[in-house]
């Protein structure tokens, strides 16, 4: 996303409410290793993982592999097939790195040959992975960093393809060979790690362009944003556990970041550009605030998210609340918006659609209409409405209800909080007609 004097470090850290958690000298010690040279691998807790049909997982031999033996996963059709094993004895909340050597032959589609932690057991952030390896390659080393869950285990998977659908389908075909697997604490010199009250930063050390003091100043703003989100919806995600923002090589091209815990930041994008803007422009970081906003969705901390037809809209709406309440600053389209002035950014989309008489379900245009309600009634109506909405169960509205019905259902809760019909007081009949038509397209 370096100042001298130890006492000054402590005073500034205390002032900002953040702290650096140093890694121990022995943190790079290997916790687990496997080179598949011994016989009986499948009887020693390794197991096949993924799709029941298609693909072959076997132990093969190659003089170039460590100990001459390796795992070979092959499929002529797209599949998500792997070899998995649960590694135990890790420290809950600890930062760990899985490394493995991989070789490929004609791997194509999906996530290719990929190393990951079983998404069925890492539900807070199932998308995290190593880089995706395609084509035909010689042996190379790939890695994945991860936060260990509360039970101190990690179910690691060496795979061809990925079991959860992504925009490219996840599944792959070809031959993926795996060898020399290790799990260890992430090397201290590989990452820059800073800790706040609610947010933790784990960045590739070579991607950080600003000082520790400047990182901590930005981190304190992320903490304030988190607290505002909590004030808006009335609860915290992940049982109040700290959220980590983690750089990773394992995100599809085109994704800047993905929400969850950890929030994944694509380390192929120019992180230095954003980090520099936090200093030069006091920019709080629209993209990161957006991803933190996603973690406060009803699907994460409420009983049901069925009423929520568009969390891209609501992640930004939560941000508007925080930016206005905290006097924050975010940039879009080369313009800095401070506090409540962020309303002007969303008016651009309103003017291009509803304001021009065009049907739309554009989330940014609808965001502007929700801010008009705030201008009339204040944020309290949303604080009340979200608390009521987050307490609803699946039976209160069907997950497959039409989006326009969900929009009106949401506004009915805002109306109840306001004590009068906000549709009648803040929308024209023509706007409602255009929104309904836009949702039906």
Image (tube, rainbow, N blue to C red):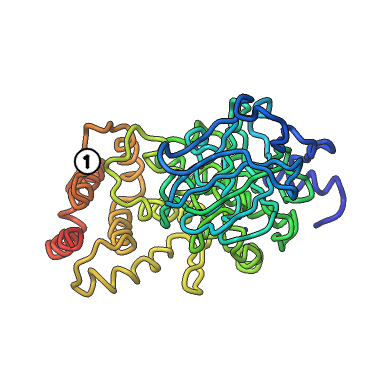
Q: Is residue 38 above or below residue 358?
A: above
Q: Is residue 143 above or below residue 47?
A: below
For the residue pair 356 and 89, the one nearer the viewer reads as 89
Residue drawn at (59%, 52%) of the image: 221
Residue 263 at x, y percent in the picture: 54, 48
Quarter of the rendering occupied by the C terminus: bottom left
Q: Is residue 252 visible?
A: yes
Q: Is residue 66 above or below residue 348?
A: above
Question: For this view, does 201 lie left or right of residue 430?
Answer: right
For the residue pair 107 and 188, the one nearer the viewer reads as 107
Residue 327 at x, y percent in the picture: 51, 57
Q: Is residue 431 above or below residue 184?
A: below
| Quadrant position of residue 375 | bottom left
For the residue pair 120 and 340, the one nearer the viewer reads as 120
Helix, strand or loop under label 1:
helix
Residue 324 at x, y percent in the picture: 45, 56
Residue drawn at (19%, 52%) of the image: 404
According to the image, label 1 marks what residue? 416
* Number of other residues with Cα within 10 Å of mark 1, as a class: few under 14, some 14 to 19, many 20 or more: some
Question: For this view, does 48 lie left or right of residue 92?
Answer: left
């Amino acid at each position: 996303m370096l100042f001298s004097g130890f006492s000054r470090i402590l005073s500034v850290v205390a002032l900002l409410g953040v702290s650096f958690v140093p890694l121990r000298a022995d943190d790079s010690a290997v916790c687990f290793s496997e080179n598949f040279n011994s016989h009986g691998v499948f009887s020693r807790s390794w197991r096949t993982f993924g799709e029941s049909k298609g693909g072959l997982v076997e132990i093969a031999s190659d003089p170039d592999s460590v100990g001459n033996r390796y795992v070979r996963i092959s499929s002529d059709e797209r599949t998500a097939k792997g070899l998995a094993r649960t590694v135990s004895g890790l420290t809950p909340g600890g930062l760990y790195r899985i490394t493995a050597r991989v070789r490929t032959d004609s791997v194509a589609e999906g996530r290719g040959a990929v190393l990951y932690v079983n998404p069925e057991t890492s539900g807070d952030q199932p998308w995290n992975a190593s880089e995706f390896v395609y084509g035909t390659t010689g042996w190379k080393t790939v890695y994945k960093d991860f936060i260990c869950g509360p039970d101190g285990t990690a179910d690691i998977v060496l795979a061809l393809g990925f079991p959860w659908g992504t925009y490219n389908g996840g599944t792959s075909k070809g031959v993926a060979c795996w060898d020399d697997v290790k799990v260890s604490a992430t090397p201290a010199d590989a990452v820059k790690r800073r800790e706040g009250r609610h947010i933790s930063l784990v960045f590739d050390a070579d991607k950080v362009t600003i000082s520790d003091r400047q990182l901590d100043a930005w981190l304190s703003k992320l903490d304030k944003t988190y607290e505002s989100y909590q004030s808006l919806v009335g609860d915290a995600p992940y049982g109040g556990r700290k959220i980590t923002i983690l750089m990773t090589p394992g995100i599809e091209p085109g994704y800047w970041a993905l929400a969850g815990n950890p929030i994944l930041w694509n380390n192929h994008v120019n992180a230095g550009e954003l980090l520099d803007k936090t200093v030069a422009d006091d920019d709080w970081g629209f993209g990161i605030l957006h991803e933190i906003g996603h973690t406060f969705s009803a699907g994460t901390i409420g009983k049901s998210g069925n009423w929520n037809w568009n969390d891209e809209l609501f992640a930004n709406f939560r941000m508007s609340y925080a930016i206005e309440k905290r006097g924050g600053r975010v940039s879009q389209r080369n313009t800095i918006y401070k506090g409540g002035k962020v309303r002007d950014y969303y008016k651009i989309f309103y003017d291009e659609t509803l304001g021009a008489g065009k049907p739309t379900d554009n989330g940014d245009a609808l965001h502007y209409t929700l801010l008009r309600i705030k201008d009339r009634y204040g944020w309290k109506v949303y604080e009340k409405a979200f608390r009521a909405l987050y307490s609803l169960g699946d039976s209160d509205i069907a997950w497959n209800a039409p989006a326009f019905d969900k929009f009106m259902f949401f506004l009915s809760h805002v109306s109840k909080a306001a004590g009068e019909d906000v549709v009648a007081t803040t929308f024209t009949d023509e706007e409602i007609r255009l929104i309904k038509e836009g949702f039906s397209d």
